[in-house]
Amino acid sequence: MSNERHVHVSLRGVTKIFRGAGGTPPVHALGPIDLDLRRGEFFAVVGPSGCGKSTLLEVLAGLSEVTEGEVRFEGKPIHGEIMDGVGVVFQEDACFPWMNIYDNIAFGLRQTSITATEIEGRVKRALSMMGLTPFAQSYPAQLSGGMRQRVCIARTLVLQPRLILLDEPFGALDQQTRLLMGEELLRLWRETGATIFLITHALDEAAMLADRIGVMSARPGRLLEIVETGWARDRDSRIVETDEFGRITARLWQWLRGESMKSIDQSSTAA
């Protein structure tokens, strides 16, 4: 059990069961799961398709109520609503096409009581951190997919979250862009000191980015193992060249190969 002072998020007995529709049986999607996220760590979750990874993130975000168990953020229970201090970035391009990049990033801040001067300062800092300053007056259609995802991350960063939840944020990008975006994400993590929780299908992405990696089973999703990577905090994509990186990804695949086959069998049976 983690020292309580350093626990940022805790899950105890978390289970999610979806009601069946039209007389179909309920779906046991998740759990039970027990997990402590350490303050300021980078935690990634991998698992086979349909294992409940995104459901777990939605529970942490307050977007979905648990069926059983409890989730706490900074000691306070999460009850079906996004709490102050939590930011979420999804895979889908969530930019508003009719707004320029500056206004996209400022959008969430303008829904608060923060002053215009403070908004301007935060947006300019976020633009600089994400390398978007030259594109502040551009529109999303004028940017590449990777740059639009930077906009989505910047829009979350300006809210200064202490917990950042990422659901496959680079899933639509090519391998080289994903590695470079991963480096950007690591830099932002070091600069902000936030706790990051990442959902990904990519074992290499999890192995490069995370301090710890949770491996989930086929549905109902449970944590089979937590892998400690042991990387230095100032790491970058060059660690993919190391033998240890290969050992970590091989260990993840040893767990996931069998679970992925189970997931395929579940899908075939359901069909």
Image: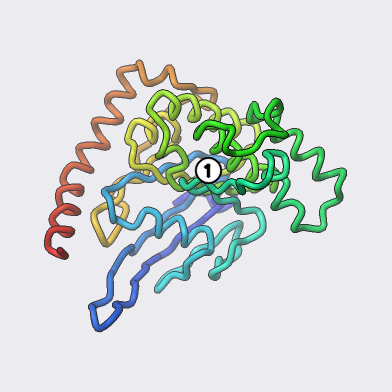
Position of residue 25 measured from the top left corner of the image (x, y, whole percent): 23, 78
Classify mark 1: helix, strand or loop: strand
Position of residue 79 measured from the top left corner of the image (x, y, whole percent): 55, 70
Q: Residue at x 80, y 45 (%)?
A: 119
Kind of residue sitting beneath label 1: Ile
Q: Quadrant of the C terminus?
A: bottom left
Residue 113 figure quarter? bottom right
- For the residue pair 133 and 38, the one nearer the viewer reads as 133
Please rate how many residues cluster around mark 1, counting C-alpha atoms within 10 Å: few if below 14, some from 14 to 19, many from 20: many
223 to the left or right of 126? left
Q: Residue at x 42, y 33 (%)?
A: 173
111 to the left or right of 58? right
Up the image or down, 210 lies above or below 214; here it is: above
- For the residue pair 208 and 49, the one nearer the viewer reads as 49
Up the image or down, 106 lies above or below 237; here it is: below
> Number of numbered discs present?
1
Up the image or down, 204 lies above or below 98; here it is: above
- For the residue pair 201 and 34, the one nearer the viewer reads as 201
Q: Residue at x 25, y 34 (%)?
A: 251
Type of colouring: rainbow
Position of residue 213 measured from the top left corner of the image (x, y, whole percent): 38, 41
The residue carrying mark 1 is 196
Q: Residue at x 27, y 37 (%)?
A: 252
Position of residue 121 measured from the top left corner of the image (x, y, whole percent): 81, 38
- For the residue pair 11 and 163, the one nearer the viewer reads as 163
Up the image or down, 13 lies above or below 56; here it is: below
